[in-house]
């Protein structure tokens, strides 16, 4: 692909600070547009620290009292928006290689004196209450720049490997997980819904039947995999689970590759290669932001991620996991026994204390996993895989899919699902069905893992959790 022409307006007006801070920038004249982090003024000089979100570092601007309009600078408060034109020069001061000698400083708007992001550090909890301004802090600047890079890297990875992207529908009539945790989508009047036989008449609703926000694009991704071989969906997903934890959001993004003519081992290989590629690219493309996380958010983060790259992921079966937990001598809050689901405390013990690196747990009892997972030959377990990582716990859930129509149908019946509602999903098992597999990586949880941010609320631009839908 050739270079795209820059839109005229952008090309001719502003230069992002990230470009000006390169040493080659010296001597260059430029115009910057941004927000003032701090100002120090003396009789002869003013120093402004300006940030425009393009990088972690601020641009230091030096204004001389001989500059036209120098008196105006006294009105510039922290948080003010400014436009500065000037020339880049080598900086005599510590902390930056280059700085800008201002020719003109235009105050666009002075921030009111109660601007909440004065220089002192704020708690992440407090910053959540000002999500409209936290984007201007160092931490959230770094978080959302890495989030941006990761979004692109995800697409690039799959595009480079020949996967076809599908945009799975957001409104759907099928519960992809069969867990009944869906947000309803309706235009019916909640005060007076149309009724038939004393119950709500969903046929009178917008879509002529019950509709909801999707919990996963997997079922549609399977349709695509059975035509395009290797595919991925990457979109928002929604869960109405009332879990008020640091890793659950009601709206989150999921990356869901699906590969045809493939089994669980191939699925695991893809997941490991994918996670490692994401780490390599994050470190390579966001070195300053990643260094910031390493220093300020999770000490040793970069060494931890490099260690992940150097060693293969572990794989254990659910049965082995249960035996490890039983033998651990730990005092868990939730019980451990074959057939019970692993809780977050168990997952973290396994991956953090016992194994110390990312770990696939495979072959779960069929009772605790979704209807679409392939039944193993033992008849009791399914070809499931969860990837657990230190610090976060589960970041990936996936499986080989049940490609045998009769087995799938009886699984649905066993679980009380109505096969008629999944008629098209069952039909895929009649016309050229093949073994296939896939997984879902929680995009927000992956970002937590890569940045060390401990709460999902701090990696999502505007989070939605039980009781919270502000901004
Ligand atoms: O394990 P889950 O529920 O798997 C699926 O939805 C499959 N249909 C995916 C597939 O095979 N195509 O969810 C997958 C991942 C989890 O491992 C987790 O990282 C993330 O999605 N996730 C959440 N992230 C944030 N908030 C929530 N409430 C989440 N629920 C799941
Ligand atoms: Mg899961």
Image (spheres, rainbow, N blue to C red):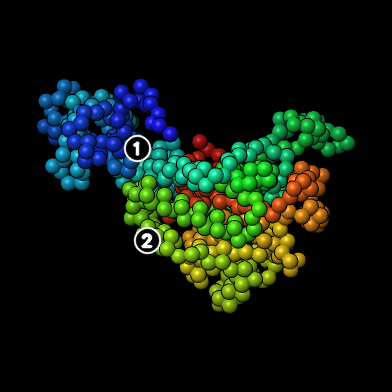
Callout 1: CB less than 8 Å from ligand 1: no
Name the residue tied to disc 2.
Answer: 303
In this view, the residue in front, 373 or 331, is 373
Within-10-Å neighbours for mark 2: few <14, some 14–19, many 20+: few
**Residue drawn at the location 66% of the way across and 65% of the way down:** 363
Where is residue 367 shown, x and y percent of the image?
73, 62
Q: Quadrant of residue 19?
A: top left
Q: Which residue is at a point 19% across and 36% down the rendered structure image? A: 26
In the foreground, 84 or 406: 406
- Which one is nearer the viewer's eye here, 215 or 204? 215
From the top left corner, tell me how far across and down residue 339 is, in percent: 70, 67
What residue lies at 60% left-to-right and 52% top-to-bottom? Answer: 439
Position of residue 344 in the picture relative to residue 32 (left or right):
right
Identify the residue at horizontal 46%, vertical 45% (top origin): 153
Q: CA distance from mark 1 to mark 2?
A: 26 Å
Q: Quadrant of the N terminus?
A: top left
Is residue 82 in view from this perspective?
no
Query: Mark 1: few, some, or many residues within 10 Å (few <14, many ≥20)?
Result: some
Rendered view: 417 above or below 133: below
Residue located beneath label 1 in the image: 54
Front position in the image: 64 or 451: 451
């Amino acid at each position: 692909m050739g270079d795209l022409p820059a839109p005229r307006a952008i090309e001719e007006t502003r230069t992002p600070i990230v470009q000006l801070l390169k040493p080659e920038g010296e001597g260059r004249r430029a115009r910057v547009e941004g927000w003032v982090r701090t100002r120090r003024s003396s009789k002869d000089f003013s120093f402004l620290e300006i940030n425009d979100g393009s990088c972690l570092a601020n641009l230091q601007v030096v204004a001389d009292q001989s500059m036209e309009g120098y008196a105006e600078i006294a009105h510039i408060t922290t948080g003010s928006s400014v436009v500065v034109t000037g020339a880049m020069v080598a900086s005599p001061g510590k902390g930056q290689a280059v700085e800008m000698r201002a020719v003109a400083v235009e105050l666009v708007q002075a921030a009111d004196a109660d601007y909440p992001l004065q220089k002192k550090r704020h708690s992440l909890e407090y910053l959540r209450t000002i999500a409209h301004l936290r984007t201007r802090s160092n931490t959230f600047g770094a978080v959302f720049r890495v989030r941006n890079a990761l979004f692109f890297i995800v697409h690039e990875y799959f595009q480079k490997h020949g996967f076809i992207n599908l945009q799975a529908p957001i409104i759907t009539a099928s519960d992809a997980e069969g867990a009944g945790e869906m947000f309803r989508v309706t235009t019916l009047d909640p005060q007076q819904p149309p009724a038939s036989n004393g119950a709500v008449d969903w046929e009178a609703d917008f879509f002529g039947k019950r509709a909801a926000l999707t919990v996963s694009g997997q079922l549609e991704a399977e349709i695509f995999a059975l035509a395009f071989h290797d595919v991925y969906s990457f979109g928002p997903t929604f869960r109405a689970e009332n879990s008020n934890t640091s890793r659950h959001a009601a709206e989150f993004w999921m990356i869901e590759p699906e590969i045809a003519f493939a089994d669980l081992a191939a699925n695991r290989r893809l997941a490991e290669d994918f996670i490692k590629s994401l780490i390599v690219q994050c470190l390579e493309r966001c070195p300053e932001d990643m260094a910031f996380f390493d220093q300020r958010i999770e000490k040793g983060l970069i060494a931890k991620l490099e260690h992940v790259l150097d060693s293969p992921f572990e794989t254990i079966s659910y049965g082995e996991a249960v035996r490890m937990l039983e033998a651990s001598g730990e005092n868990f809050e939730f019980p451990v026994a074959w057939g019970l689901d692993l809780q977050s405390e168990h997952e973290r013990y396994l991956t953090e204390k016992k194994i110390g690196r990312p770990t696939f747990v495979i072959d779960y009892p069929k009772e605790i996993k979704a209807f679409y997972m392939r039944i193993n030959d033992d008849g009791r377990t399914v070809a499931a895989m969860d990837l657990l990582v230190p610090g976060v716990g589960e970041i990936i859930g996936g499986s080989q899919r049940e490609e045998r129509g009769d087995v799938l149908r009886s699984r649905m019946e066993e679980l009380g699902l109505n096969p008629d509602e999944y008629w098209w999903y069952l039909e895929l098992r009649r016309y050229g069905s093949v073994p296939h597999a896939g997984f879902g990586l929680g995009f927000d949880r992956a970002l937590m893992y890569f940045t060390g941010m401990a709460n999902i609320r701090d990696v999502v631009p505007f989070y939605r959790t039980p009781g919270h839908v502000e901004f």
